[in-house]
Amino acid sequence: MSPAGCSHVNSFKVENWKQNLRVIYQCFVWSGTPETRKRKAKSCICHMCGAHLNRLHSCLYCVFFGCFTKKHIHEHAKGKRHNLAIDLLYGGIYCFMCQDYIYDKDMEQVAKEEQRKAWKLQAFTPALVSPYQYAMTGVGEKYSTWEPTKRELELLRHNPKRRKITSNCTIGLRGLINLGNTCFMNCIVQALTHTPLLRDFFLSDRHKCEMQSPNSCLVCEMSTLFQEFYSGHRSPHIPYRLLHLVWTHARHLAGYEQQDAHEFLIAALDVLHRHCKGDDNGKKANNPNHCNCIIDQIFTGGLQSDVTCQVCHGVSTTIDPFWDISLDLPGSSTPFWPLSPGSDGGVVNGENHVSGTTTLTDCLRRFTRPEHLGSSAKIKCSGCHSYQESTKQLTMKKLPIVACFHLKRFEHSAKLRRKITTYVSFPLELDMTPFMASSKESRMNGQYLQPPDNLNNDNKYSLFAVVNHQGTLESGHYTSFIRQHKDQWFKCDDAIITKASIKDVLDSEGYLLFYHKQFLEYE
């Protein structure tokens, strides 16, 4: 969207548009009286599936309610060319041409005025009601609009200099001193500090520590680390406190020996997850097996395992959480299948296929292919009530906001220990739709037929960090590439930060690949 805002709202701003918008806010969004709340509950259902939930939106051009989650409002917008809709829970305006929620000063003014009227009509005291209760009562979330005080305005006048974020801004780029074979830690820290939602969480001071000793809290130290990275200081940072806390809470990583970056990532996420329990979102989870802390919100996905009996074809399904996906590579002792169908030239999932080159998509195809478990691994079928041969297939039930792919380059077995140096081509943009559990029936002979739906962006990702390993299994060095802006990449080699080209990134060997969802939806 351009800095001037969405240009498509002009088609809505015709005669009496303000009055029409006010009626929608009064009747279907900010319901201030019991009568309007009853009318909203009775009237606001999806005109296509009859659902009350699934993020209902109302068309601004005609009387139509559709659910956003199942894309029924999208279908209406596409068929009728009605490009604007309003979220009936939060009051945001969505533009289907921009594919985003938009801001318009005039519309925002109408929304605020009607919301204030609804607050006044409520019988309870706003200060005693939680944001969630506000949303459920139909008046939206209660947030006080911040305005600078006279004292703050005076300070701004006396300090006119402003720090501007430009396209070549280097704020957030900072080297890390190697404290003795700690490059495995430094490269993961660089990836985490450039994870957009994690950065926003820590820079907005969202962590509330409830540990008896805050000095032993890894989340507190990460918060300090983010402040250091985005302070504007250019001298390399010395992460000695972070290293000490890692040694304290993950004893298997203690010492000055070279460690595995992937192992450090999982250990760090685990400790951060445990130390986030005091935060508001962490407290909300009553189910001990489900946490809503910032780590789980960003990194946790759901992996579906379907075991199918070969006799009665009964299916047993389990869904397990994951923080990363470990992918086998050609050249390992595990047989690799399939090689790319486009290996004779072509583009699949944005990857350029050179003859014989393995791609990330190939690795994901192999990961999600049906696997025959064989006679030596029979399972007891609940349908047959006896042990039968079966097939097992893994697919993605729920995708995380940040998808981390671990290319299994280090092979440890009883016979050999070695590093696999097979080059794997990975794309800047990745569509995970073919590997979803919901896409299983769309596959034919292991292939996926892409539906002609340009509005389906839920499963699309962009690359933002790559961790590489140079050297052998016994002796090596970790570096990382991180994306600073949309198309600006930098190589992080401990204390040294240098500019890198996209070609440098895509030509690198790749050990850990970090992808971020292109489109996020609130829940």
Image: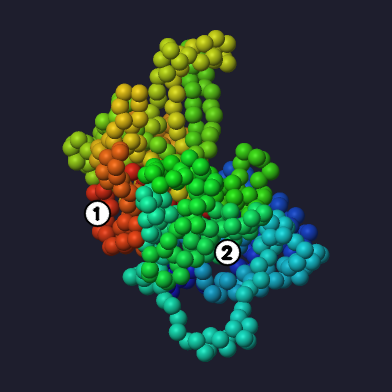
User: Which residue is rendered at x = 20% and y = 35% of the image?
Assistant: 356
**Is residue 476 left or right of 205 when viewed as pictured?**
left
User: Which residue is rendered at x = 45% and y = 15% of the image?
Assistant: 377
The CA span between labels 2 and 1 is 35 Å
User: Which residue is rendered at x = 43% and y = 12% of the image?
Assistant: 376
Q: Nearer the viewer, residue 114 or 498?
A: 498
In the rendered image, residue 334, in percent from the top left (x then y), is placed at 32, 26
For label 1, the SS is helix
In the rendered image, residue 514, in percent from the top left (x then y), is placed at 39, 49
Say what amino acid the circle numbered 1 marks.
Asp
User: Badge 1 is on which residue?
Assistant: 504
* In the rendered image, the vertical position of residue 45 relative to residue 320, given as above or below: below
* In the rendered image, the vertical position of residue 122 relative to residue 315, given as above or below: below
* In the rendered image, the vertical position of residue 415 relative to residue 310, given as above or below: below
Residue 141 seen? yes
Say what amino acid the circle numbered 2 marks.
Asp
